[in-house]
Image: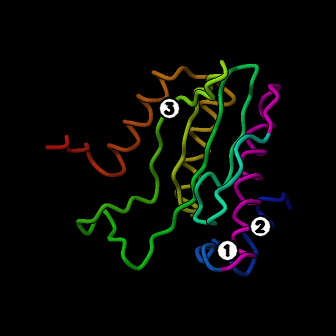
Amino acid sequence: MDKLTAIKKHRKYPFSAYREDEEQYLMSQVYWLELFKSVLLETKKHWEAWLAPSTDRDGSSIFSAVCFQLGKGVIINQYFPTAEDVPYDQGGNYHPFIAWMDVLDDGQGTVIEHLTLNSEISGHCEALCLKLLRMYVVENRSRKEMEEEIRSLEDKLYGPLQAEP
């Protein structure tokens, strides 16, 4: 049994109480690490740990990795709905999976283009994360190609996004 499968057998999976339960927060970090490592098996590029997770344990940058050779990074924000969140299909703004491309400039000459995944832990979201991670990390797709794929995925998941008034 691989590590990712073993993690999914944990009694508290999918770790939705990570905000209150330190064990679930740590297991979430391990989940995202193992998910990313499963993609790394398909490439020879060197990726390493990048940004520190938020000290608030809110899921912000719960996992990140960077490949300085490519000038690319990945940031994963874990998010499960709170009691106040209303799902998108009920007229609210909670979406279990959102992705975007961005650039992080450290102000000292290092500029890293990165894929950000804002996702809950679920089988459906895992498949979406793996798809985008493979495209970006293994296939080395361009920012333009990634943005087109993200837009297409979000249109399929949530319908065309309305422009802000």
In contact (CB < 8 Å): disc 2 and disc 1: yes
Distance from disc 2 to disc 3, alpha carbons, whole Å, reads 30 Å
Span highlighted in magenta in the image: 21-48
Q: Amino acid at mark 1?
A: Tyr
Mark 2 crowd level (few <14, some 14–19, many ≥20, 10 Å Cα): some
Q: Is residue 82 above or below residue 107?
A: below
Where on the picture, by quarter, is residue 47?
top right
- Residue marked by disc 3: 102
As rendered, which of 37 and 92 lies closer to the eye? 92
Q: Residue 72, relative to residue 64: is it above or below?
A: above
Quickly name the residue at label 1. Answer: 13
Mark with earlier residue (2, 1): 2
Is 87 displayed left or right of 160 in the figure?
right
Residue 66: within the magenta? no
Q: CA distance from mark 2 to mark 1?
A: 7 Å
Q: Give the residue at x 39% y 58%.
A: 95
Q: Are marks 2 and 3 in contact (CB under 8 Å)?
A: no
Secondary structure under the numbered disc 3 in the rendered image: strand
Element type at marker 1? loop
**Residue displayed at 70% across by 74% down:** 24
Question: Residue at horizontal 63%, vertical 38%?
Answer: 74
Which of 38/88 is in front?
A: 88
Q: Main secondary structure of the magenta part?
A: helix
Tell me which residue sits at (57%, 53%) in the image: 77
Q: Is residue 60 above or below residue 39?
A: below
